Amino acid sequence: MSLDEQAIVAIVRSATRRARLLAIAEGMTVGIAAAASSRVAGLVGAIAYVVWRWQDSRRRSIVEATEESHPELQNLLITWNEISEGALAVTPSAWERVMAKTAARAKSIDLARVVPATRRLELADCGHAPYRERTNTVLETAAAFLQSAG
């Protein structure tokens, strides 16, 4: 494996690790909330959530999320992934060009943009209880977040 490919694989692995750790942390949070009603509900809720979110840590999902959050990659990472998985046949010189360009651009990848840990919602004229004061907005935002998550 070339140094360029090692650099690309390292970025993808780091994003995968981040996505999996966030899935576990979020699952624990869901489990804690569900445990308020019963321990079994907490355990089942946590496991179900982690299994559901784990799908986002597959290599193809990580590559697509990286391309979506970094348009400057111009499909290079997807092309690299297709070539390395054998889905796209290219000449050795084309492989080297894709590898070099992808590795050069991969240095600027921000993992927090690929796999964000938070979503920010600002509500004007809202106090300390947005779930009471702006219930519909909070529910709509939560629904949109869950829909975007999978």
Image (tube, rainbow, N blue to C red):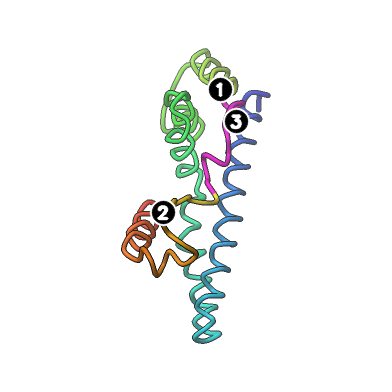
Q: Position of residue 18 (x, y in %)?
A: 60, 49
Q: Residue at x 46, y 62 (%)?
A: 127
Q: Name the quarter where the N terminus is drawn.
A: top right
Range drawn in magenta: 106-116
- Kind of residue at badge 2: Leu
Picture layout, residue 109 above or below residue 105: below
Earlier sequence position, callout 3 versus callout 1: 3
Magenta-colored stretch includes residue 110? yes
Instruction: Find residue 8 and name its label.
Output: 3
Q: CA distance from mark 1 to mark 2?
A: 36 Å
Q: Which quadrant holds residue 150?
A: bottom left
98 and 14: which is toward the camera = 14
Q: Residue at x 61, y 36 (%)?
A: 11
The residue labelled by disc 1 is 105
Q: Position of residue 12 (x, y in %)?
A: 58, 38
Q: Is residue 20 left or right of residue 82?
A: right
- Kind of residue at badge 1: Arg
Dot 2: within a 10 Å radius of its alpha carbon, few (fewer than 14), some, or many (20 or more) residues?
Answer: few
